Image (cartoon, rainbow, N blue to C red):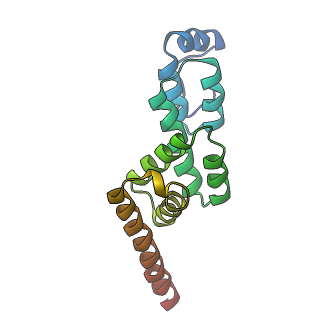
Amino acid sequence: MLNLQPALPWATWQELRTESRRAPESMFSRMLEAREFSLCAQWMVLYSVSEHLRLQLQTEHLLHLLEKGQTDDAFQLLEGLSDLTLGLEVCEHALDRRPGLAACHFLANYLTLHFHSQVSPARRRHIHDLHLGSKVSRFNYLYCICEL
């Protein structure tokens, strides 16, 4: 942890341990900012972290995987969540962050296939529109690339 970027203000593990006990959520936020997702997951086992930050971890990790084009890993992350409600929340929060085209398509598709009955009709229409929009935009984008 002492090697995280941006650098932490503590020089020794003893200082880090003291601060971790004093403000575990602050330390968690720093790790999340550094995109140290596995470290964050281990942190949650050792320290008390709010449900909001737990949701934020899963959402950030999912978006990170989708940004890198790692859809198989993103799918495994969602399938590995302990609670279906958490999976729905993570997907909806990620989609509400207006991710890139491929991520939007993945999320809309996943929500449609896995949570169709748990989503309100208005939200279903919105997700369906995003799904169609991502398909249309992708086609137009690929068409522009092929023309070059």
- What is the x, y in percent for residue 84? 56, 43
**Taking 37 as reference, is 146 above or below it?**
below
Q: Residue at x 51, y 43 (%)?
A: 60
- What is the x, y in percent for residue 24? 52, 18
**Taking 128 as reference, is 24 above or below it?**
above
Q: Residue at x 38, y 52 (%)?
A: 96
Q: Residue furthest bottom?
A: 147
Front residue of this view, candidates 116 and 63: 116
Decide if residue 5 is on the left or right side of residue 118.
Answer: right
**Taking 68 as reference, is 50 above or below it?**
above
Q: Is residue 100 visible?
A: yes
Q: Is residue 33 visible?
A: no
Q: Residue at x 47, y 81 (%)?
A: 139
Decide if residue 95 is on the left or right side of residue 49.
Answer: left
Front residue of this view, candidates 142 and 113: 113
Front residue of this view, candidates 105 and 146: 105
Quadrant in which the N terminus is drawn: top right
Count every numbered label the image shows and give the total: 0
Name the quadrant containing residue 132.
Answer: bottom left
Front residue of this view, candidates 73 and 27: 73
- What is the x, y in percent for residue 25? 49, 21
Decide if residue 9 is on the left or right side of residue 69.
Answer: left
Q: Residue furthest front?
A: 117
